[in-house]
Image: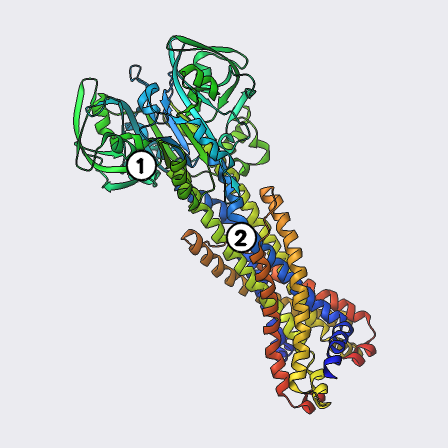
Amino acid sequence: MLFRLLRETFWRRRQRVAVAILAVVIGSSLATALFAIYADIMDRMAQELRSYGANILVTPKSESLEINIAGAIYTPLQEPAFLEEEGLARLKTIFWRNNIMGFAPSLTISARASQGREPVAVTGIWFDRQVVIPKGTQVRSTFAQPTKASADVSFRTGVRSVSPWWQVVQGGWIDDTARGEALIGRALARRMGLGLGDAIDVGYQGAARQLRVAGILATGGDEEDQVIVPLSLAQELAGAPGAVGRVLVSALTLPKEKLAADIRNKKPEEMTPKEYEKWYCSPIIDAITTQIQEVLPGAEARAIRQVSEAEGTFLVRIQWLMLLVAVLALSASALAVMTAMTASVMERRGEIGLAKALGAMDSQVATIFLAEAGAMGLVGGIAGYGLGTALSVFIGAQVFGSPIWPHPAIAAVSVALGLVVALAGSAIPVRKAMRVEPVILLRQG
Amino acid sequence: MKRSIFPTLLWKSLSQRRARSAVTLAALLLGACLVGALLTVSMDVGRKAGVQLQAYGANLLLLPRSGAQATQGDAGAYLSEKDLAFLESQEQAGTTIYFAPYLYAVTEASGRKVVLGGTRLQPDSPLASWWKVEGTWPGPDEPASGLAGVAVARALGIRPGGTLALQYGSSVLSLRINGILDTGGPEDSQVLTHLPTVQTLLNKKGAVGLVQVRAQAGPGLERLARSMEEQVSGAEARIVGQVAQAEEQVLGKVQLLMVLVAALVLLASSLSVSSTLTTAVMERTREIGLMKALGARDSTIASLLLAEVLVLGLLGGVLGYILGLLVAQVIGYSVFGSAIALQPAALAMTLSIALGVALLCCIIPLRRALAVEPAIILKGE
């Protein structure tokens, strides 16, 4: 009986019903899309920021002071403290190994140049290298226990992916195996009057090399005053095979504010084992630097605070902005759905009067109206979730270049929202109408 | 005659159907409020979020053209501090340009080489927002005070309040260390003090080795760099690729995201406003039939209804925009801690959307109602 009644009213008033359902669809699709974006925005933006450079600097633990003024290194290599190039692949075995987006080891020496009397900083670097973590390597896959890698994992990294703003303005990149070629910083090239194809002699202690200028490099940073060569060449010049002076690491991290409040301001050494585990397994920068120091003995990993703090506040603000916008849009669309439902009930006050005059009980009338509202809310909520998914996929593709898929939990929220708002919107006018005498309702209708 | 009765008709129609008019007005107001707030926020979000990224530090470096002081040691070329005066008054796109001049000297302290940097020690500058100081910042009236980087402090065993003797050539500078500086950058292995102190030590009055500049990201940065090269003699302006590129791209994404969200909300609220309006006009089919039966011309009825909707649209649009502005300020203060700038374009867009949607939505049901024979409408079929 109830089902037939519903079918009949829906069919007779299909235009009105369509309008009411449309309102629900719009409301819940907005909710779906905006909350999907809200849930994902911090990760997306963090990833976006990561393509603009390293946020962790790994250096050998050493008491010697770095004499570095705007990129020119004055530290003599007499008390060498180095990291081992060999061990760097272990960066990809830490707990948050998948968050290590890339790393670039380098070694800078202050060399003599034949042209000009000033010393020239020569930096050896990985341009684009293949790193292989062989099968059977210990990997910290869980907090408690390391496991062995089940297959070879290979990974490409180097300065070209870690610092994508490096530009070769003339000539081209050189190969990591090149021996007689170098890139030269734009400012240095101008000062020394060097052009593409020219030769530059660099000497360091006993060793000397003649290098051909294969490209002019513009970075906006210290490198513009340096000669850039493959790492292995710099190591040969320095007579220190396998030595690395520093490693820039680009790690995907979330701001500290994402930690639970009870451990946010605690120092790791003051935490209980359980809290420590929670901290260790959060993708925050301090946890990642700790994990890097665990796998690279003798290394000191420090957050480049300038980068990590700027990004942290930025991410927290942007997420907060999205939340406010989502709540705003949501409350507005809830109100719109409620008005649509109210209008649709108000129109039918006459029907309520008629039903009551014919002897229907209040509960029966309410059941019919609420069932109607519930059906509309359900249909609208489901359709709204579908439309909202399409919207967030579209926005994700437009803004971040890859779709944002709403979390399944959002489906439940979106449908529940459609139901609740539709029911609430019709319950109030139905109750009001039932208090009025049927005769009056009939006369008005 | 018609001219005089028209306002009366309009007023009566609006005031006697108060509840209905109020619902329509409320729907328009809500939509306009939401659209106004989001448009205002999305137009300003790039600048606002840019302020957050200021903590990235300098995005422009000013160096001597003939080679940085650094690469040539203490005998290098210098910039003149006087030439920097023009930066003080410079404002770019409504935001202040921040800058910090640096002059370096390689000194010796207890037999170890230490870099001494002279600069303006400004705790509240965005160029130092990530600096952590244990102890106090040196006051401007104590020339022989400074900050020691954490690595220096560790290596030389200095505590806040201690003194450090730095030797440069034959002269010795005795510096009171007010605080220990932790920046996570190269300053950690340097000692920083006031600029004039280093200028005196090097005997280079008014000389500056390098200037860090923080300016608004975007296409204006390149222009600013060129104009700085003209103003400061012998200078090369270098855009810090990492910072400048990151900002431009990320802020572009945030702006695009907000614009898309605003467009989405705009579409949704137009649709929900339109459903309310369509019902409001449809309800009055009987009235239209009555007017036609009494001899009113189609154009008279249409202009009466359109005028009604126009009044509601204008009122809802203006009030909604004002409310939206308040909402935008709430967002501005709670997210960015500062007011969102007024966007005249947002007002124009909100109003035209409110009016456009209102008019568009009543045209279709109105035409339908006018096409029907009055007798049929009145009979209620």
- Chain ID at mark 2: B
- The answer to whether the residue labelled 1 contacts the one labelled 2, judged by CB atoms less than 8 Å apart, is no
* Image coordinates for residue A343, horizontal then vertical, percent: 69, 71
Q: Nearer the viewer, residue A90 or B79?
A: B79
Q: Nearer the viewer, residue A330 or A51?
A: A51
- Quarter-wise, where is residue A116 in the image? top left
Taking the spot 55% from the left edge, 43% from the top edge, the residue there is A317
Closer to the observer: label 1 or label 2? 2
For residue B262, say whether it is visible. Answer: yes
* Image coordinates for residue A400, horizontal then vertical, percent: 43, 51
* Image coordinates for residue B219, horizontal then vertical, percent: 42, 46
Is residue A35 toward the left or the right of residue B74 in the image?
right
Q: Quadrant of the N terminus of chain A?
A: bottom right
Q: Answer yes or no: are tags 1 and 2 on the same subunit.
A: no
How many numbered markers are drawn?
2
Q: Nearer the viewer, residue A146 or A275?
A: A275
Callout 1: helix, strand or loop?
Answer: helix
Taking the spot 76% from the left edge, 77% from the top edge, the residue there is B8
Residue A159: which numbered mark, if any?
A: 1
Three-letter code for the amino acid on which mark 1 is drawn: Val
Gap in Å between the C-alphas at discs 1 and 2? Answer: 36 Å
Is residue A437 toward the left or the right of residue B46 in the image?
right
Seen in the picture, residue B98 relative to B138 is either above or below; the reply is below
- Quarter-wise, where is residue A432 in the image? bottom right
